[in-house]
Amino acid sequence: MQRNITYLILLPGLLLGLFAGHAHAQLSNKVTFGGAGRFLLDQGRIDGELLETDTTTARRELNGLALFDFGVTIRPNEDTEIKSVMRVENDIDGFWGAGITFQLRELTARGVAGKVVRYAIGDIDAALTPYTLWNPSSEFRLMRNPAFDVFRDIVDYENFYADSTWRQQGLEAEWKLDFDRGIESLTFHGLVSKNRNTDYFTLPDRLLAFGRVQAVINPAFSLQLQAINLFEIAESAQFNDEERAHRAGSILASTGTSCSSMDWRLDVETGLSSVRYANLAEAPDEPTEDFFVDGTARLQWPQRNLQASLSYRDVGPDYRAPGAQSRRLDPAASAAAFSFYTNRETQRPVSIADVVRDRTLYNRTIAPELGAFNPSWENAQPYGQATPNRRGVHAAVNWTGDSARRMEWRGEAAFLTEIRGEGTEALRRFLTVEAAGIVHLGRYAGWEKALDLHAGLRNQQTTRSGTEGIDEVSLGSLQAELGLQWEIYPRLDLLGGMLFLQSEGNEYLADRDGFNRIVFYDAYTADLRENWISAGLRYRFSDNMVLSAQYFYLDRLNNLDPTTAYTLQQAVVLYNLFF
């Protein structure tokens, strides 16, 4: 075992170092290389009341892996590009090559047809607007934190999260027409992808298709029209005649102008959704339809590095857009480390540490059903801006610092209410306030080396008037985050971090059927506290290659069930490379 670990430490480092030295090496103008590599070694120990009566669950775990993503981009001519990424991965318990897996991680062909139409076939990252096709961010991402960001970046990389896009497999095309008069340009963009494969018997194929037309009238005004459809093909399964279709569309109007002292912009988007069922016995007889409207005004003072925005949004109770309402995080998933206890029969409660570090808790697929969520983590907008049954305002301010860039901060506040009561005529009210900032202490002191302090705070309150114990709701959630980065030697950083969660109160969670109809309400009560701290060292070989050694300590206490309290200690060595 010791020899196997030693090989896993040395060989990936040597291999990745060789490739790093030749980043983007070119055999010719037609072939380029790129990729990523990672070595992770994780030694963990779990203790606490959770295990006091458990005599079978292991208190320690040693986990880790070595992986390498090797990418090749081939350009057979000036109009065509083919990219593939092959992954080789080996867990540390795979002896003498027995645990090695090979996977084709990405395969895409793209190019320009007839010097006019840009196309892509294969793996495609797609997004439209936050109300039609969008991948909203997951919980506990209050700010950039040097102690935790590398793990968040790994989660995003492993699940293909980039710029709020969903990874799709299909065909994409785009072309643009320029005009001499009337309007400046028209851009057409379309995609068709497979969302689910048929089992050839009772489960039909499910496809996703969208189209978008963008008209630039002049430099100060543009219109964008998009429509998306998530639908099933009944004939693709032999013993099936059922079909579901989720359609959504919107129009977005944008206007604005720039001057020497201030820039302004106004975006207004409104749209409709419709869900239709065919040959389903228990489905609604009539289509489920609703609408949304969103208006956002943005101001920017470039000379002061200051930005501000004010939004109003109204999303109907029955507005359904799976492409924008599918969640990244599944709170009911099983964590990879110390998954079960009590003779491996009871699932360990997922913690904030798991949310930040565990890539297996996340979802890559657009689903037609509104997914489950944890109200102690996020209750106001668990499905992003497109969360149905919400109406209210949102304000934000962002300052990127003075001329010396010694401090940066941002603040946000949102006040939302329900449009239609759930189980009662009374409406929930949601108040969310958050602030985060960075102080570059080294710049204040005039040091050449970095000394940065990161801090963030988020408070969310949910209330609903009613009879206590029947329909009254009062749930509070407080999140705090601290981070420290101190360059104690050139490229060698001392890292520290803290993530804190406290939630207390009660809620009623909607239990929905396969048609997103509420059929029951589950009482939810919280009195929870979690604290996760970290300290360690990081060496930056370059901006894209780092080696870090960190210690993490998690303390989780649920006062409603103290027998589930536990502490988790982890020592992690991570070598991460992109080239």
Image (cartoon, rainbow, N blue to C red):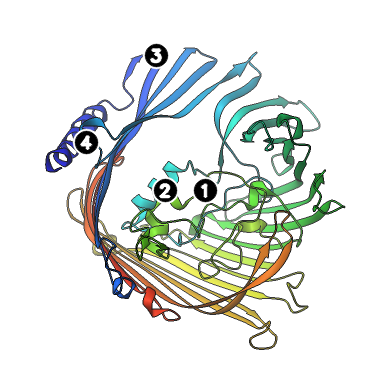
Which label sits on residue 155? Answer: 2
- Name the residue at 76% across, 47% down: 250
**Residue of label 1:** 363
Q: Amino acid at mark 1?
A: Asn
Q: Quadrant of the C terminus?
A: top left
Toward which corner of the image does residue 227 lie, by quadrant? top right
- Cα distance in 3D space between marks 1 and 4: 30 Å
Task: Say left or right for 194 vs 215.
Answer: left
Q: Amino acid at mark 4?
A: Phe
Pick whichever of labels 1 and 2 is earlier in the sequence: 2
In front: 440, or 342? 342
Residue 32 versus residue 94 in the image, above or below: above
- Outermost residue, right side: 286
Which label sits on residue 29? Answer: 3
- Outermost residue, left side: 3
Q: Amino acid at mark 2?
A: Val
Confirm or deny contact between disc 3 and disc 2 (CB under 8 A): no
Pick whichever of labels 2 and 4 is earlier in the sequence: 4
